[in-house]
Image (tube, rainbow, N blue to C red):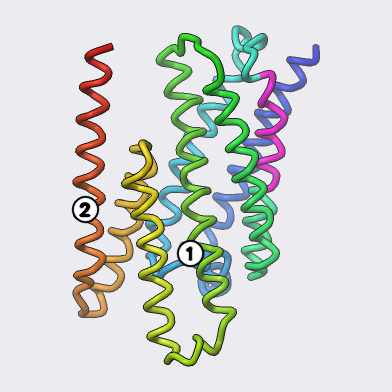
Amino acid sequence: MKNNLRQFVVFFSILSTVMVQLFVISLEMTSATAEKLYAYLPVAPIQSYFIYSVWIIIDIGLSAYAIFQLLPRQRENPWLQKTGYWVVVSVFANSIYFLLGFAGQSWLALPFLLVQLFILLFVNQIMHSGPRKVSINELLTSYIPIRLYLDWLIFTSITSIIYLLSFQSTSGFGLAINIWFTYIRIALFLILFFITITGHDIIFNLIIIWTLLGIIITIAMTGIIPWFMIIIEGLVILFTVFQFILYRKKHNND
């Protein structure tokens, strides 16, 4: 009975969160309140289409996870039992994050972003604790969606914190404000690039590639060619291909 309740609570929590996200995204895409909504993701000038496309993919993955964990055969799944209610808290924090963003309360939304991040780190740790065989269905409906959700939260947390701090500072340590923002952006890209080349997570690399593409297109539409970002994009792609080749070799050897 407890497991049945957990399954339905997880399912309807994810369903409600997906509905909140799609509601906010639809307003961003169709209404005249875009400027107000844009404040809830205070990152580099990435086209909102690139940002929201990642959230939509995450929603699809979370929906697959919600259906997978609802199956009768998953009722006694030990890692789903351990993480089910943590996922509920995470998606609840996600709904509050989106709604506060809708109200333009970026600083108030940030703690709920970090709550999601820390919970997903914990859930990911449980998922990978102990040797056990993972079916292809579990991989596609649980492991990859949770990992994508976690990696996007890592990326969004880093960018949000840096840009909230940068916009909070009006002095720029004596520098002109445009030069100060340039340094902030360079620092941001270097941090993300460092995570890319030192980590072993291809999904995170793909997130960087996609969002950098959005930045490049956004800036190029103004008539400026962002050579620095194009170089970073090319390097991340090369490292991702290299990591994929190493992964394939290791998998074949095993």
Residue 172 lies, with reference to residue 220, above or below; the image says below
Span shown in magenta: 81-93
Mark 1 or mark 2, whichever is nearer to me? 2
Horizontal arrangement in the rendering, residue 77 relative to residue 135 (left or right)? right
Check contact, mark 1 vs mark 2: CB within 8 A: no
Mark 1 secondary-structure assignment: helix
Name the one closer to the observer, 98 or 241. 241
Residue type at mark 1?
Thr
Which x, y percent locates residue 195?
Answer: 39, 49
Q: Residue at x 48, y 26 (%)?
A: 143
Q: Residue 183 location, x and y as percent?
A: 39, 76
Residue 63 is left or right of residue 201, and the answer is right
Residue underneath mark 2: 235
Is 234 located above or below residue 81 in the figure? below
Q: Residue at x 42, y 92 (%)?
A: 176
User: Sequence order check: which comes first, mark 1 or mark 2?
Assistant: 1
Mark 2, secondary structure of its residue: helix
- Residue 168: x and y in percent read 59, 79
Q: Which mark is residue 100?
A: none
Counting from the top left corner in percent of width and height, residue 214 is at 32, 61
Q: Nearer the viewer, residue 3 or 175?
A: 175
Residue 122 magenta: no
Q: Nearer the viewer, residue 202 or 70?
A: 202
Could you tell me which quadrant the C terminus lies in?
top left
Q: Which corner quadrant holds the N terminus?
A: top right
Judging by the rendered image, the residue that carries numbered circle 1 is 30
